[in-house]
Every structure is written in C-alpha cells, then in structure tokens.
Image (cartoon, rainbow, N blue to C red):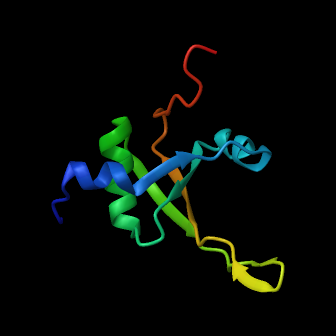
Amino acid sequence: MTEYNPRDLADLVIKPIITEKATLLLEQNKYVFDVLPKATKPEIKAAIESLFDVKVTGVNTIKPPRKKRRVGRFIGHKPLYKRAIITLEEGDTINLFPDV
C-alpha cells in the first residue's frame, strides 16, 4: 500500500455536502464530500480514514461536465468540481453536525 503524506491528504477534502439527497444517503452510512478534481479514489479513502478515524469500505466519485456561463459577450465555464460518495464500515459514523 502506498504511504501518503497526512498534510497533503487534508487538502484533498474540501467540504461535506449537505443536500436533501446527501442526507438520504446518510441512512445508508454514505457521506458526500467535495474533493479536489485531481484526487484519486485511494487518496480520498486515505484522507477520510486519517481525518475522521473511520474505516472506509467504498469510494464512488462523480465528475459532472462543466456548464457554460455567459457574462455579456464573453462565454466561460463554471469551475470543475468532483464529489466523492464515501461508504463507511458498519458501526462507523462521521459527526457532520456537532452539538446540534
């Protein structure tokens, strides 16, 4: 197994996603995070395991196509992003809402 630098792994995970669909996935012990587009599945797994002290059983990633945006006569794109759906081992949880 490849050794990862813990300082680099912390930068891969940007933020957790709290949407209606993501909260429905919480019942299946799945968590959704925004990650850097260059992050790979093994890196994401290592980052989540080191940040939250949990055992990850699966990582699914989503990299949707960029949408065009127009400002006046200039056409550009929305920023590229990547989401990771993390499946945890039975019994492990991540506390996304502390003290609520």
**Which residue occupies 70% across, 81% down?**
76
**Which residue occupies 52% across, 28% down?**
95
- Residue 89's x, y, as percent? 45, 43
In the picture provided, is 20 more to the left or to the right than 15?
right
Q: Where 20 falls versus 35 (above or below)?
A: above
Give the residue furthest to the front: 72
In the picture provided, is 62 more to the left or to the right than 55?
right
**Which residue occupies 58% across, 67% down?**
81
In front of the other: 64 or 68: 68
Q: Where 12 falls versus 82 (above or below)?
A: above
Quadrant of image for the C terminus = top right
Give the residue furthest to the right: 72
In front of the other: 64 or 80: 80
Quadrant of image for the N terminus = bottom left
In front of the other: 56 or 22: 22
- Residue 57's x, y, as percent? 43, 53
Residue 12, picture quadrant = bottom left
